[in-house]
Image (cartoon, coloured by chain):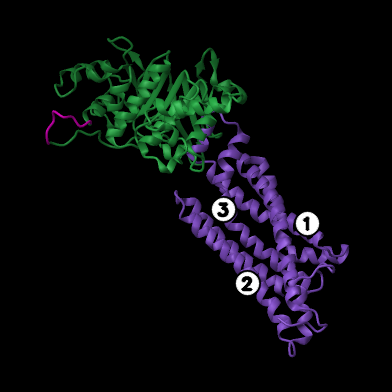
Amino acid sequence: MRDLRVRFPTSDGVVQACDGVSYDLSRGDVLGIVGESGSGKTVSAMAILGLLPASAEVTGEIRFDGRNLLELPPDELRKVRGNRIAMVFQDALAALNPLHRVGSQIAEAITTHRPAIGSSELRDRTVQLLADVGIPDPARVARRYPHELSGGMRQRALIAMAMANDPEVIIADEPTTALDVTTQAQVLEVLEEMRERTGSAMVLITHNLGVVTVAADRALVMYAGKVVESGEIREVFAHPAHPYTAGLLASMPRLEHEGGSLERIAGHPPSLMHVPSGCAFHPRCPRSRLPEPCATAIPLLRTLLGPGHRSACHFAEEVIVSSSDDPSQPTG
Amino acid sequence: MGTDNQGRAMWAMVVHGLATSLITVVAVLAISAVIGIAVGALSGYRGGVVDSVLMRLVDVLQAVPAFFLAIVAFAVLGSGQDKLILLLGLTSWTFLARIVRAQVLSVKEREFVRAAHSFGSSGTRTVFRHVLPNVVPAVVVILPLLASRVVLIEAGLAFIGLGDPNRLSLGYLISNAQPYLQYYWWMSVFPGLVLTCLVLGFNLLGDAFNDVLDRGPAPSLRASRARARTRIAAAGGSVEVAAALD
């Protein structure tokens, strides 16, 4: 993905939901995209499959297998969707059609791309997929309606649907957010297992840092539609080079901190219609030096010491040093 | 039920009149359901110019009251049940098209429609498999209301002498009984009662569907919207009733 920009013109002004997002994803890679609500992480993923509303203005380049997905004719794009790139949605109850049985919805995902498949093979494949995602008694569950299943089961069924055609890329948009904590861990495990079995790459979108640490190899931190930090997951979390990442990490509850209150990032994420000048994070940043340079110059994403560790902060080096000194930060 | 002024059995005539009403209703509903759902789905799903053109057509058709259009048409062309069915079928779908369109607009924003797209489902397939089945509840609630309107229009036309001359109609029976109201009360009361029960029955059926579908597994905005629309439709329906009985 190169320099993806998504704008939504509205009657009140233009919403810049995604502002120059770039990343690479190779086979077997797991990229975690982290950010608050409204940071543009979901929009950037929806753009990959062309699922944004018609009013969205999308520019940039999303190359998949040598072809720019943004310029693909609708028929060609449809062959990619669900077949080579599949999506796992956040809310499985909403993403499954309430009127069709779970099995028939999975079968539909298969027949969409393999219309010639025989009915017994289709049934076997459907049941096999449900078994693969760890659903007990898959043949019976296949005949159930979505509302008859538990949240974890539904999410597994949705993963089975996404895996139906062994996609090369899985986009998981907050796949565990709607679930309780124990189920979250199981579903993540299933997702990871399925991914490893097929060797697919995955884009994991979440606001839960714990999820990213468990599942991802690399992390991309987004704020107000921009990438503010990216790099190897251990590197980013051990030595955050952007005050926003540092703030997110400090606001996570940790076992070794008994009692006391959690740190928090002051203020609210900005409206994407009125993004602050210069560095979008400066009004909430504990380190901002005003007015120069934070409120005037837009910091560029630049490479720091570590391999592939990039940050968009004017004072990234200082942030790294001080975060490494802080004993409360997790190391590695 | 006795006999009429010419000695014909009232019971047999009421049964045949009821049959006329029901045949008309079923045929009209079939025609308007097909056209209404097709136009509503196309309009709601496509949006844009298609939507504007189709909805303006609906506006124009809805501006013409079916009852008076029927009077004019039958006065010119002569009456007949087939003509009545065609005329009502070709005019009353507008009501349904609006409701289907509104439902499609809300259903197509739901996550599973986006999910279907993300799995590579084509537009047509998405509409038939994911959008329309979710529109059915609203249609089921509305159809009985449309049915009661059709019954009243059919009976009303027969009452003023514009019914099919070859078929008995409840409206004709009531009109025929007028000169004998003082002497043979049963000539007007029984067809009138059957007509009332039929219309009331359709309305209660609509309410019952509404209640049942309201208690479905996913009570949502959809249900409450359908309820609001039913109320509006009922209000609109009663205006029509007034017009039909004038």
Q: Are marks 2 and 1 in contact (CB under 8 Å)?
A: no
Q: Is residue B149 visible?
A: yes
Q: Residue at the spot x=60%, y=57% of the render? A: B142
Residue picked out by circle 1: B86
Q: Are marks 3 and 1 on the same chain?
A: yes
Q: Dot 3 falls on which chain?
A: B
Q: Upstream in the sequence, badge 2 or badge 3?
A: 3
Chain identifier, purple in the render? B
Q: What secondary structure is marked by label 1? A: helix
Q: What secondary structure is marked by label 2? A: helix
Label 2: few (<14), some (14–19) or many (≥20) C-alpha neighbours in 10 Å: few
Q: Position of residue A241 (x, y in %)?
A: 27, 19
Residue range of the region highlighted in magenta in the rendering: A252-259
Q: Is residue B104 left or right of residue B89?
A: left
Q: Position of residue B26 (x, y in %)?
A: 70, 58
* Colour that chain A carries in the picture: green
The amino acid pointed to by label 1 is: Leu
